Image: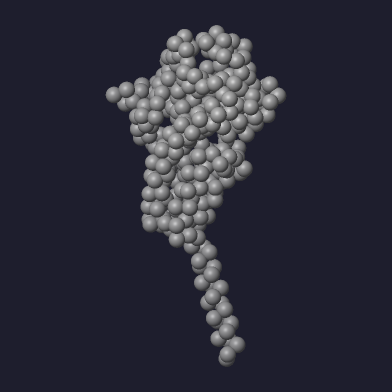
Amino acid sequence: MHRRTLHLSLLAGLLAVSGFVSAQTKWDLPAAYPATNFHSVNLAQFASDVDKATAGKLKITLHANASLFKAPEIKRAVQGGQAQAGEILLANFSNEWPIYAADGLPFLADSYDESMKLYKAQKPMMEKKLAEQGMMLLYAVPWPPQGIYSKKPLNSAADLKGIKWRAYSPSTSRIAELVGAQPVTVQAAELSQALATGVVESNMTSGATGVDSKLYEHLKFYYDVQAWLPKNAIIVNKKAFDALDKPTQDAVVKAAAEAETRGWAASRKVNTDTMAVLKANGMTIAPPSAQLKADMQKVGETMIKEWLAKAGPEGQAMLDAFRK
């Protein structure tokens, strides 16, 4: 009798444990940037906030530095359910749907305040599009403004002719074409090596990537043209989200809203801090000359026209909402 009671209590214990395990949900969240990057740090905080708010019911594992999926594969992975959530650079998906890449249009939104205005114009359209693709937007955070890094001084767009220019999106490739530079596609993780071997001589990116990739070791000039502030978006598979109970869903949404606010503030701080680091490492930081700015604005106007031709009435509606 005693032994049977022991067996029953062991069995009850096992059932309790397995019940707990099945009640715990695990999500994978692939991201493309190093764990030390401010976007990744913010994501880690988001995952930790969700863990705390749900008392461990939802565990989100962050896979930084493209360790689970490479940058271009993350959206498809979330859409297909191989990952429950993921972080994507919206500008990478311009070929799929032009509105995704509105924040990659040069000189459209050229400050944090303008960037937030653009996000508000983009967001309802983006939420609708993601829903059609079986996903949801959790939050979005911009990179610091994009400037031009170069080995040699640049006084006008003519100085970019023939230069080996790192492209990481359709927009950055198009800028290269319009100024007569030679676009070379290189992902963030391989940038240092491309610079060291002379495959790349110039690129357009933020101060954050400049410090992450130690661009000051190879490039001497940074022109603060504030061309655009491309956003990273955190997306989630709708089925995975719908499978959560209501309190867990609420916890995710609340943690996402906090991560968005925190992320925008972190981006501003990173911009200020990274400029100081670039300067301390001997880089010349300068505003663009009047000629370079005018040349680049022409490039911007051409690209907005081209974008509108693809984006059609939807794109025009978004621009109108932004310019209101």
Q: Residue 297: name its quadrant.
A: top left
In the depicted structure, whether residue 194 falls above or below residue 300 = below
At x 52%, y 17%, the residue is: 175
Q: Residue 268: name its quadrant.
A: top left
Q: Quadrant of the C terminus?
A: top left
Q: Quadrant of the N terminus?
A: bottom right
* 304 left or right, relative to 10: left
What percent of the width, then of the height, locates residue 246?
Answer: 38, 56
Residue 6 shows up from this direction: yes
Q: Residue furthest left?
A: 324
At x 48%, y 44%, the residue is: 42
What percent of the width, then of the height, locates residue 123?
Answer: 38, 34
> In the depicted view, which residue is nearer to us: 226 or 183?
226
> In the depicted view, which residue is nearer to us: 9 or 222?
222
At x 44%, y 38%, the residue is: 266
Residue 81 shows up from this direction: no
At x 40%, y 26%, the residue is: 111
What percent of the width, then of the height, locates residue 264?
Answer: 41, 37
